[in-house]
Image (spheres, helix red, strand yellow):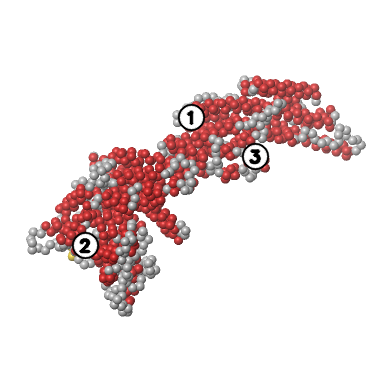
Amino acid sequence: QQQQQQQQQHQQTKITTSAHLQYIHRIMRSNYDRSTMLQQNNNDVNDDYMDYIATTRNLEQEGHFWSLLSKLLSSIMSKTTINPLECLFWKNTTSTSQLFGATSTSTSENGDMLKFIQSIVDANIDLDPAAMIHLVSSYFDDDDDDDDDETSVQPPKIVKRRKIILEWIESCHNRSILSFELGTKNTATGNTTSNTMWKDTLTNLQNHKISTNSTKITSFHPDAPLLTRQNMNTITINPLHGNDDATESYLLSTCLSLIKAGRLDEALDFVRQSGQAWRAATWNGNAAHGYVLDYDEGEGSDIDIDMGEGKESHGKLVRVGNPNRALWKRSIWHASQSMNKILTSSSTTSSSSSSTTVRDVENKIMASGSIVYEAAITSILADDVTTAMKNPILNRNWLDLVWLYYKGKQSRFMEELYSRHNTARRNLISNADRFPPEGTMFETEEKEQLACTEDISRMDDGSFLRTLEQKYTGRGSLSNDDDNLEAGLWRRGMCAFLSSTNDVKLFLEETIQYVLGNANIDDEEEQNGSFLYGKEVVLRFLLHLILLLDSLTSDHESFSAFRESVIVPYHNDLTYLYLRRLMMQKPLWPFTCLYASLLPNEIMIDTCVDFWMNDIYDDNDRCMILNKAREYFAEGLDLIILRRVVRSSIVASHHHPPMELLNNFVRANVGIDQRSFEKKIGKEDIMKMHTIRWLCFHDEHYADALVCVNMLIRQFLLDVKTDTNDDEIGDWSGDIKLRTAKLFKSRFLPPDLIQKARNCGALQVANGDVNFSDEVHDYSNEHEALVSFLDAHSAYEVWKDLIMTLPESVDYQYGMVVPQGSLESEIAAKIEKRNFIQMKRENGTALVKVTEVAYKSLLFVLNVEDGFLRSDVTTAGVNYSVDEMRQRQSELNSLRSKCLPTTIFLVYRILMETGHWMNEFLLDIMQNFDREQASDVLSRIQMVDDEDNATSPLLPEYWYEHASMLADVVLSEDHDVGNCMSKDELEYFKSLMAETETYLTQCQERNI
């Protein structure tokens, strides 16, 4: 049961680690892909070549850093399971300050490794070296399909880690030769590589063109160039003819790159293809000696192989490797020393001036041609780390030096294994007359190689890396190298993770404090030259690294001190700072919600409110941002942000919308008057109307949309100017705020706003909020009242435009007396009378219809259910705070006192002016006909039946009577209009009622 729990825990850890690896791989691939793209497009680089080089290098270096973390974390996926954090945060350090764990010194590490080697050797002493190497390697291979054996020998974790690091470095080197094809064009000479060694030199020797005092070689053998340089004690000469040295440099530099990438076999194939098989034989002496099974036909000893389950197969034992490996190792070591002596002695002799620097000497060596590459390869194959690190081809690159160190460590481990295994095999010999086992004859050479590589065994990873960093940078602190922050950042980061947890902590603290200390988080006007702009790459890198470490260490109590000292103090500041950078770049807006979600809710909401309100103006951007917020934020947070954004926008008065938005607001397909009006609308009002659309993308936001729509319409109406004269009340026609409110209603509001808001309320009730439906009902009533007032005023303006242009009289040419004496004149008189009646009917009917619409619309405002803008919600609810509720009640009361009296006076004006128009309409008839004819004409014009006793709307008294009825509306408690009117307004209304009675009396006296 305990085993099962451990397996489940391990499986869960693997799943989690897999997610972390995907996160790292995405960042790594992003950097590598961008670097590759730049390198492929390098022909387009002109003036900015140096920037191009720096950018490409930085992208590669950052990719290498994330590749390192990926390799270290991948250890959890192997059968030799170690905690990924244990491999990522190595405890090995010689520093006295420890975050956790005990110090693991080089001495104790060596003891663990030797103990492991001895246990393997003792248990498998009969194996040949090749089989032994294969067995030991299997302990460090990543094989997820094999089951862990608790009884098996556990390999040292440090060896496993170093193997991972070495594989990582080789993968980084492999990046530089991914597109390399053996036998391609020689970039040094412009010619393709040849399968003939030193072709130009061979031609000259065959033609006997060599003088006795020449600096060129006089005999054709592999060591001739080296011997010529040695005899002349200089490396500045070119002992080969023509382009042979350039071709040789190209060949050896390519092989060096392949070897650093862990592709020795390809390097051997390449030199064979280039006609230098001897060089392949020279380099290929490190392979372990032994016998392997070969099922193919070929030379070897026949053997029957037991395949299990009674099955047998026939194969051959084939000898592999080099039984004289120890002898070869010492020979290649001496060759390394000899080449290094030639390089250093001749270059130092020729540069003996006191002003000559180490870099001058290295430059001279670099210019020596192919020998510098050959010396580098020889020292690498000899495991001569000290000599290799002196070679300028290798010591100018930090990654090469680290590779040399870890390769030296691995080689030392293998030398210990070879030596102890061979010693054990030699000790098996009981008869002194027996020959020693094959491959064990060189005990002296084995001991010499161990003695020569003893220095590398005593070196500690952390000490080496820290010493290398100090020598490489030549500075003590980050602040001394502002201009090269990005260039050295990745190296310092890689060095820290390779060293120890304490180094990681110091690296993060130093870099983060420097970034935050030089970036003004509150600066609203960051310019291109500011630190925040120029170091965005550094900021992004640090944030992504902190996010990864935060996720990795969150469930591990042993890392609590690390979290509290490095991650927790800087997490929010880095996230906020990077988020601000994303907000300043529109193409990166889709990522803002993702990074905002990493902040605490309070900071996240404040930041999003400010960004959404002041920077996002386009509906497509609003929709995109909102969808991202709903994807990354906790449920309901998007609505909380939207409420603040929209309400703050309605109240705010400091909007700075882009000119494009303002220009697009004025429509081209409208009349001149409307277009002129739209140009006059203030930019703040334009922004307020646009901001409502934040709440119109999702149905569950419509209740809040209704609230904010009402809020904005109330604001517009409250801002309407109410200038009045002593003898009349203003009708608000032409007021910019009133027209803006009408435009807002017609152009910005969804047609199904109320229905969707009520559906939203019903949904909330179903979810347990029993009061929400009552609130939505109250807001719906308010909205309907506000819209009814706007519609009624629009109807009033239609009536006003008509009555000001519609004539009361119609021309009638024949006067009151019809000429006598001819039939034609009588017919003409009848036609003219009929035309007169028709025109009078059309004009009267048109005015009556428009007046009825305006009158009923305004009367509807006065008769709104539950009273115009009366609210039953008096306490704070879901959509209003206490202060907002008080503000709303105050605004509703102000609007009732402002709109209801105006509505009464508008109704009165419609009725009275229509009555006056009808009076002139009637007088026109009476002036053209006698009383009897006028009565006939009127009966043919009017729109009521003769049998109907109702007053015709073509008579003025019809409208005067309706005007007099307004007194009942004002005095009615149901409408509460009287309580909304001031004392002066009531007095003025009473005078109007008295005037109305006078007009009614005059109409009764006329009695047509």
Residue at image coords 28%, 45%: 86
Distance (Cα) linking label 3 and label 1: 37 Å
Amino acid carrying mark 3 in the image: Phe
Relative horizontal placement of residue 911, taking residue 152 as reference (left or right): right
For label 3, the crowd category at 10 Å Cα-Cα, with few meaning under 14, some 14 to 19 and many 20 or more, is some
Q: Position of residue 551 (x, y in %)?
A: 35, 42
Amino acid carrying mark 2 in the image: Lys
User: Which quarter of the picture shows residue 366?
Assistant: bottom left
User: Which numbered disc flags the more N-terminal residue, 3 or 2?
Assistant: 2
Mark 1 element type: loop
Q: Which mark is residue 329?
A: 2
Residue at image coords 74%, 28%: 915
Q: Position of residue 423 (x, y in %)?
A: 14, 57
Q: Nearer the viewer, residue 83 or 240?
A: 240
Q: Which mark is residue 878?
A: 1
Mark 3 and 1 residues: CB-CB less than 8 Å, in contact? Answer: no
Q: Nearer the viewer, residue 109 or 178?
A: 109
User: Which numbered disc flags the more N-terminal residue, 1 or 2?
Assistant: 2
For label 2, the crowd category at 10 Å Cα-Cα, with few meaning under 14, some 14 to 19 and many 20 or more, is many
Amino acid carrying mark 1 in the image: Val
Nearer the viewer's eye, disc 3 or disc 2?
Answer: 2
Distance (Cα) linking label 3 and label 2: 93 Å
Nearer the viewer's eye, disc 1 or disc 2?
Answer: 2
Residue marked by disc 3: 677
